[in-house]
Amino acid sequence: MHEVVTLQLGRRANYLCTHFWNAQESYHTFAPDPPSIVNHDIHFRQGISPDGTETFLPRTLIYDLKAGFGSLARVNGLGAVLDTVNTDALWNGSVKRLNTAPQYEPSPYARSLLNGAEPVLPTTSTTHYFADFASTYYHPRSLCPVLPPSPIFDRAANSNNQASSSASPTLTSRFSSFEAGADLFATRDAEVDVLDEDIRHWIEETDSLQAVQIFTSTDDAWSGFASKYVEKLRDELGKGCIWVWGIDTTADLAAFGSDHQASIAQHRERRTNVALAVTSFSEQASMFVPLALPKRLLSEVDLDRSSLWHTAGFLSAAVESVTMPTRLKEIEARSPTMLDWQDKLSSGGKRGIAALAFHPDFAIEEEGITVQKPDVHEDGEDDSLQALKINLSPDAGPSGSRTQTPPRNKTFARIETFRCSADGSRRAYLGEENLPSKSGLLLEK
């Protein structure tokens, strides 16, 4: 069946994946409508809820800080409460529950779905958590809230104090460095054994695992968490297919809200996180695809950069479009798998970093689709990424560079996905590229 198991690590990844799951949910069809061309068994699993109801839920694991689940931290779509303790087995007397954590009420959109009413469309002001616009229910085992140790030992800050023999280790409550994320993974792995308790159940219930795909941010602590997770999975899966989609916002300070006033040291920390993450993923993952919003977008794109709901939705549209062939039913020929794409893009396993571009507005004619062909240079090499209007790879050029012409990238292999419908179309491109030698895998800007 070629199933895919998804891991969502951190707030930005959960926003992006919520858009992805909402899209998959929209492809479900019911009689008398014609069957969907999407094979839902690839990303969804059948099951039975506690009350005996048949369920069809995403095959995913959602990691976030406990406060990041919003209303899902109290109750999920199946009515199962997280962190519930069977007090009857521990105490025969009366129990008074003291809630010390903040209580999050469902958003108007989520509440309308729970009540079976007409959906109240979400807005930027009502999407404070990914649960606020999720239209999909999740299995209780999918929700993996984590609690960072407090205080966190900040290795980066402590290294600056090594010159002073009297300096004490630096303790901080910030959860922002690669090392903090790596330490958090080590703590969780020691407590619950991530492979056995979290993901093994999902992998073993598949008939034929196609791939494990991981969504994570690369410029915060979740980069370290994801790096250690991928290392653990690589030891477990051997040569199995592992894709990592890494969200980089270092060039888009608006995504951090008031954080645009951050110090130079904090900005360097984000860049260091990216460098460490890219180095790790390029070595351990089968394919690593960095994702970033370009500094400038088409005038036709109405996007609020300060809204994670908006920015994650834009990135999700590209990811969801370009991977669509891997979950289509076998109509005329065998549908490609992520392993097939890995072999094509990596040129026999020698390259493991791909670039993603998005072309949302090409023309449609009555007889079919008209596509503008990429520009071809005199040396015969097509500049595929520049030909497409929206490049979603982080800028590989140095920040503040006086070079007027951006460096040319050689395309070794590429995969194009075309989508069209009666009311519009989207085109996404996934191609492996050799980054300029000055920046290499560090993605220096």
Image (cartoon, rainbow, N blue to C red):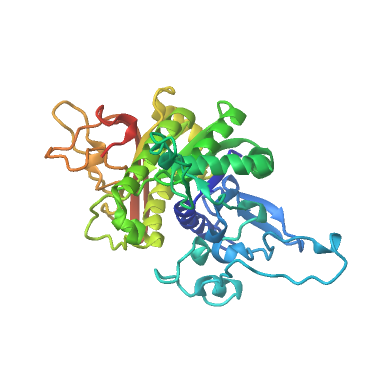
Residue 373 in view in this figure:
no
Q: Reply above or below: 163 against 132.
A: above
Extreme-front residue of the structure: 166
Q: Reply above or below: 264 against 276.
A: below
In the rendered image, which quarter is residue 256 located in? bottom left
Q: Position of residue 41 (x, y in %)?
A: 60, 47
- Viewer-closest of 422 and 111: 111
Q: Position of residue 54 (x, y in %)?
A: 71, 59
Residue 15 in view in this figure:
yes
Apparent side of residue 218 relative to residue 52 in the rendered image (left or right): left
Q: Residue at x 57, y 66 (%)?
A: 71
Q: Residue at x 53, y 50 (%)?
A: 151
- Viewer-closest of 332 and 242: 242
Total number of numbered discs in the rendering? 0
Apparent side of residue 278 relative to residue 299 in the rendered image (left or right): right
Q: Position of residue 234 (x, y in %)?
A: 56, 30
Apparent side of residue 42 relative to residue 282 in the rendered image (left or right): right
Q: Residue at x 46, y 43 (%)?
A: 154
- Viewer-closest of 438 and 37: 438
Placement of the C terminus among the 4 image quadrants:
top left
Placement of the N terminus among the 4 image quadrants:
top right
- Viewer-closest of 265 and 293: 265
Extreme-right residue of the structure: 92
Apparent side of residue 172 relative to residue 253 in the rendered image (left or right): right
Q: Position of residue 135 (x, y in %)?
A: 54, 64
